Image (cartoon, helix red, strand yellow):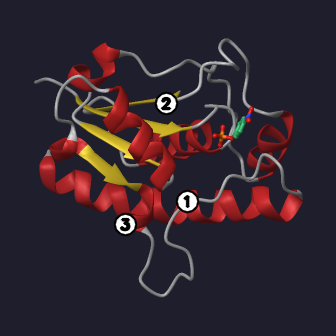
Amino acid sequence: MDKYKILFVCLGNICRSPAAHGVMQRLLEDEGLDAAVEVDSAGTYGGHQGQLPDHRMRRHASRRGYNLDHRSRPVTQSDFTAFDMIVAMDEANARDLKWMARTDITPKLVMMGDYLNPSTPHTYVPDPYYGGPEDFELALDLVEEACANLLTEIKNKL
Ligand code: 4NP
């Protein structure tokens, strides 16, 4: 059976999307679903290509038990066909993805914020890059919450 393929996208692919990638990978492994679902991440901006996640995100994630070792890469045209679901961290990411894609990606493009709990006072995952430690903690809180809810949806698709 073909794997269900999920791509997490942010701007630089060094903070939010590699965190989502690592968190989702862990959830899938914990549930024994890593053979059925593939996750990856990429950025709409390629300036950090080849880099490990930002050292602050790596440190905060490591305290929660995640080892983030993805190397940043830009989104490519083939991603728009290869992945079943493309998850944007914020509206700017979604707008950039729609602008980049030569096909209509609306059916597979979803917002990470749509998977947050209704009681959570955030509608997207804010960029922590220019922020402090609390911004990295918030990004991880939101990513963990959204990934758990996303996993519930994915299970229904398998
Ligand atoms: P990310 O954070 O999109 O969550 O990876 C950023 C990383 C780099 C930059 C901005 C946001 N930057 O301007 O270089």
Rendered residue at 68%/52% (across/down): 127
* Precedes in sequence: disc 2 or disc 3: 2
- The quarter of the picture where the C terminus appears is top left
Place of residue 134 in the rendered image (x, y in percent of width and height, measured from the top left): 83, 65
Which circle marks residue 144 in the picture? 1
Rendered residue at 83%/49% (across/down): 130
How far separated are the C-alphas under marks 1 and 2?
A: 15 Å
Q: Is residue 28 visible?
A: no
The type of residue carrying mark 1 is: Glu
Number of callouts in the render?
Answer: 3
> Is label 3 in a helix, a strand or a loop?
helix
> Is label 2 in a helix, a strand or a loop?
strand
Query: To which residue does mark 3 refer?
Result: 114
Residue that extends furthest to the bottom in the rendered view of this protein: 119
> Is label 1 in a helix, a strand or a loop?
helix
How far separated are the C-alphas under marks 3 and 1?
A: 13 Å
